């Protein structure tokens, strides 16, 4: 790919732009605020999200979306899941014809219950074979520090996935390809909710046995839902399933886990948001949509449902924890 635009200069968007630049791919990062774009372009830093990371001099940045999109062969959408549609509707007339669209967002849209690739196709009229998703154990801070990790680039068009793979392959970032977009997206969306549950357990003072149990049973829920929607079971045993789940549930760098810890300590969602500098974890925003998606497909997701009830203020974290422990006995 001769040129890539990354739309969204948050921590993951900025980090992925750095990965592309380090891989030798010409890339322009779009930032909503002009001062962020200027800092990236002139000082090679993103003071808002990655203040301690020196960005490549080759990484261009702008606050003009048209400038970022001009001549791009791939457009990377690095936006929160619930804000993807509104931004994409604005950008749609300016997207280069036939461009590859790459989603970094991990969530299920409220109301429509659509995955991010489905939102992209609906808004842009692009065929599903033009949309790729990136998912895996990809904590932005560690990748920005060039700690080694792997990821999955999933696209129904394998050749397109390979093109994205080559564009973002570096000595510290190892991308694999997959054609199971459904599995990769649901793995990425659902793990945020399970990470909220794990953080809540930590906030309640529980230890590693509880954490391991939630991760394992959480994976079972994710797998049941993903397979019901057409995913390949093995996808959920890989980087976009188990890999992403372990990283997000275990790391203090995970916003979802930190948010869950605040809930476990007795904070409300509003109080937890304030404690996280006004940022709401993606799992909080998607848990109701994922719960409803599971209900419509007849899939049992007790952990997801429990997180939804806590986030909606229906029960306390302690009450729902007791409910999960005292569920009926059955075969694993």
Image (spheres, rainbow, N blue to C red):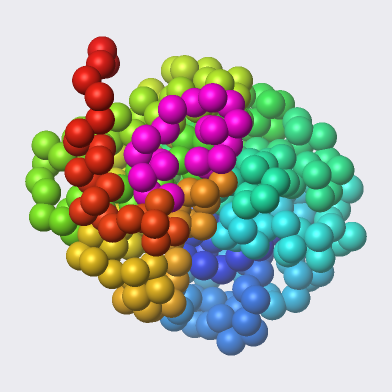
- Specify the segment rendered in magenta: 290-308
- Please determine whether, in this image, residue 207 is positioned above or below residue 28: above
Closer-to-camera residue (281/151): 281
User: Measuring 83% from the left and 41% from the top, which residue is drawn there?
Assistant: 126
Measured as percent of width and height from the top left, residue 24 is found at 56, 51
The quarter of the displayed image where residue 7 is located: bottom right
Tell me residue 178's x, y (percent): 56, 25
User: Magenta part mainly helix, strand or loop?
Assistant: helix
298 inside magenta stretch: yes
Of all residues, the one furthest to the bottom in this rendering is: 35
Residue 317 sits inside the magenta stretch: no
Judge whether 308 appears above or below 216 on screen.
below
**Residue plotted at (74% across, 63% down):** 86
| Image coordinates for residue 22, horizontal then vertical, percent | 49, 54
Q: From the viewer's perspective, tell me whether residue 211 is left or right of residue 220.
A: left
Is 225 situated left or right of 119 in this image? Answer: left
Question: Is residue 102 at all visible to an observer of this figure?
Answer: no
The image quadrant of residue 36 is bottom right
User: Can residue 120 be spotted in the picture?
Assistant: yes
Q: Please report the residue visible at 62 percent of the width from the left and 52 percent of the height from the top.
A: 110
Residue 11 horizontal/vertical position (percent): 46, 65
């Amino acid at each position: 790919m001769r040129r890539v635009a990354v739309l969204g200069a948050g921590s993951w968007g900025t980090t992925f732009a750095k990965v592309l630049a380090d891989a030798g791919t010409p890339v322009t990062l779009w930032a909503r605020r002009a001062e962020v774009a200027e800092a990236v372009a002139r000082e090679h830093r993103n003071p808002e999200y990655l203040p301690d990371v020196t960005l490549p001099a080759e990484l261009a940045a702008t606050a003009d979306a048209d400038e970022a999109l001009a001549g791009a062969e791939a457009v990377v959408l690095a936006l929160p899941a619930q804000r993807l549609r509104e931004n994409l509707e604005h950008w749609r007339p300016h997207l280069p014809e036939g461009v590859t669209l790459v989603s970094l967002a991990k969530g299920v849209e409220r109301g429509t219950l659509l995955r991010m690739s489905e939102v992209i196709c609906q808004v842009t009229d692009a065929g599903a074979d033009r949309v790729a998703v990136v998912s895996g154990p990809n904590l932005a801070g560690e990748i920005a520090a060039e700690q080694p990790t792997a990821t999955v680039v999933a696209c129904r068009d394998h050749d397109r996935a390979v093109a994205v793979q080559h564009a973002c392959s570096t000595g510290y970032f190892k991308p694999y390809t997959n054609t199971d977009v459904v599995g990769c997206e649901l793995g990425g969306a659902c793990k945020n909710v399970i990470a909220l549950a794990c953080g809540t357990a930590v906030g309640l003072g529980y230890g590693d046995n509880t954490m391991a149990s939630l991760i394992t049973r959480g994976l079972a829920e994710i797998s049941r839902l993903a397979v019901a929607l057409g995913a390949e079971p093995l996808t959920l045993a890989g980087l976009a399933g188990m890999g992403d789940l372990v990283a997000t549930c275990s790391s203090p760098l995970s916003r979802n886990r930190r948010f869950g810890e605040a809930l476990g300590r007795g904070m409300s969602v509003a109080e937890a948001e304030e404690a996280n500098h006004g940022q709401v974890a993606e799992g909080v925003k998607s848990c109701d949509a994922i719960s409803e998606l599971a209900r419509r497909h007849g899939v049992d997701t007790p952990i997801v449902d429990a997180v939804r009830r806590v986030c909606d203020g229906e029960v306390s974290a302690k009450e729902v924890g007791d409910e999960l422990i005292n569920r009926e006995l059955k075969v694993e």
